């Protein structure tokens, strides 16, 4: 169950729902068993320089090795940066959760 966060200065016109959907689609092309990618976007009116920072968090799995990570990051960075219509600073990172991270569907008892 990957998670994606888009943090950006609010002077940028971004279609963050489309960006988050594209992130999920790209992850699933690389790893069909990854599941839905939970996404959130955080515009801010307080910033220094126009920027977008995107982080994708994944669980550690045996097949998610260096080659997988490099290919996924390359595809994500190229496709998502193409969706940004203005000049700005851009950062994109993959992060892997520690073994002490739990992710599951919550259902109240």
Image (spheres, rainbow, N blue to C red):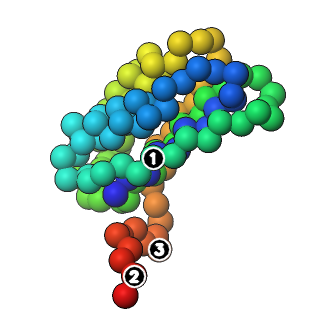
- Number of residues whose C-alpha sits closer than 10 Å to that of mark 1, classed few (under 14), some (14–19) or many (20 or more): some
- State the residue in front, 38 or 31: 38
Q: Which residue is mark 1?
A: 39
**Point 51% across, 46% down: residue:** 40
Q: Earlier in the sequence, mark 3 or mark 2?
A: 3
| Residue 13 sits in quarter | top right
Residue 72 shows in this picture? no
Residue furthest left in the image? 32
Q: Residues within 10 Å of mark 3 (few under 14, many from 20)?
A: few
Q: Quadrant of the N terminus?
A: bottom left
Q: Residue 9: in sight, yes or no?
A: yes
Q: Which of the 4 image quadrants contains residue 29?
A: top left
| Disc ID at residue 21 | none
Residue 108: image tag: 2
Which-is-in-front pick, marks 2 and 1? 2
**Residue 38 location (% of width, % of height):** 41, 51
Q: Nearer the viewer, residue 63 or 109?
A: 109
Residue 90 screen position, x and y as percent: 59, 25
- Of callouts 2 and 1, the N-terminal one: 1
Asked if the residue at tag 1 contacts the one at tag 2, i.e. Cβ–Cβ closer than 8 Å, the answer is no
């Amino acid at each position: 169950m990957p998670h994606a966060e888009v943090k950006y200065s609010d002077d940028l016109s971004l279609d963050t729902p489309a960006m988050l959907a594209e992130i999920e689609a790209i992850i699933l092309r690389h790893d069909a068993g990854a599941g839905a990618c939970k996404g959130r976007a955080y515009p801010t009116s307080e910033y220094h320089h126009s920027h977008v920072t995107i982080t994708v968090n994944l669980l550690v799995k045996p097949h998610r090795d260096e080659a997988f990570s490099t290919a996924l990051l390359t595809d994500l960075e190229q496709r998502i940066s193409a969706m940004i219509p203005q000049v700005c600073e851009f950062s994109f990172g993959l992060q892997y959760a520690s073994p002490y991270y739990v992710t599951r569907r919550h259902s109240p008892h």
